[in-house]
Amino acid sequence: MNVKLNDNVLVITGKDKGKTGRVVSTSPKSGRVTVQGVNLQKKHMKARKATDVAGIVEREGAIDVSNVMVICDKCGKATRVKHTFVEMDGKMKKVRVCKCGNVLDKTYKKQAKAAAKPAAEEAPKKRTRKRTAKAEAPAEENKD
């Protein structure tokens, strides 16, 4: 399945064609996804306890995976997903890629940023207390 949890998707067929939303849940065995604000269904809820309130509740229904396309964060277009292998920590990882070259997997992006940070950041700044910084400043002025 090319669609994962928390992906932004565009509905390409059906009564909700053209709507976009975030994937709330996936069901790989049945090949269905639930998208926020898409395929709203009304369900009649009966009060089961004395404190419960009966009523009609609207909730999202599942739609087939073939009816949605992933939206790329970089180019903002709905795209077919391409799979490529990228080396990460000496291991080959399979990642989803847009046609523009942007990596769609958020976990890979986080790992790539974390790996790039220590190289750019050599040493953290030395922490000093405010009191000692104030005490040192007048002492330096008196020396002159």
Image (tube, helix red, strand yellow):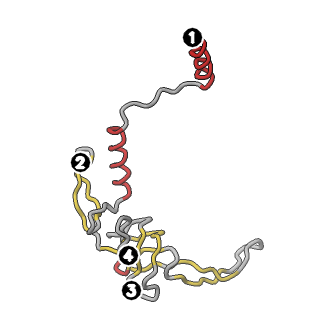
Looking at the rendered structure, the kind of residue marked 3 is Thr
> What residue is drawn where x is 26% and y is 54%?
93
Vertical relation: 41 (above or below) 97 = below
Q: Any mark on residue 143, and which?
A: 1
Other residues around mark 3 within 10 Å, as few (<14) / some (14–19) / many (≥20): few
Return the disc, 4 or 2, that comes first in the chain's sequence.
Answer: 4
> What residue is drawn where x is 41% and y is 73%?
9
Q: Any mark on residue 30, and which?
A: 4
- Residue at disc 3, secondary structure: loop
Q: Position of residue 38 (x, y in %)?
A: 49, 79
Q: CA distance from mark 4 to mark 2?
A: 31 Å
- Residue at disc 1, secondary structure: helix
Vertical relation: 94 (above or below) 2 = above
Q: Residue at label 2?
A: 91
From the viewer's side, name the closer residue of 139 and 92.
139
Residue sitting farthest toward the right: 50
The nearer-to-camera label among 3 and 4 is 3
Q: CA distance from mark 1 to mark 4?
A: 79 Å
Q: Any mark on residue 13, and which?
A: 3
> What residue is drawn where x is 50% and y is 73%?
36
The nearer-to-camera label among 3 and 2 is 3
Instruction: Tell whether label 4 touches label 1 (CB within 8 Å).
Output: no
Q: Position of residue 49 (x, y in %)?
A: 73, 73
Other residues around mark 2 within 10 Å, as few (<14) / some (14–19) / many (≥20): few
Return the disc, 3 or 2, that comes first in the chain's sequence.
Answer: 3
From the viewer's side, name the closer residue of 136 and 77.
136
Instruction: Tell whether label 2 touches label 3 (CB within 8 Å).
Output: no
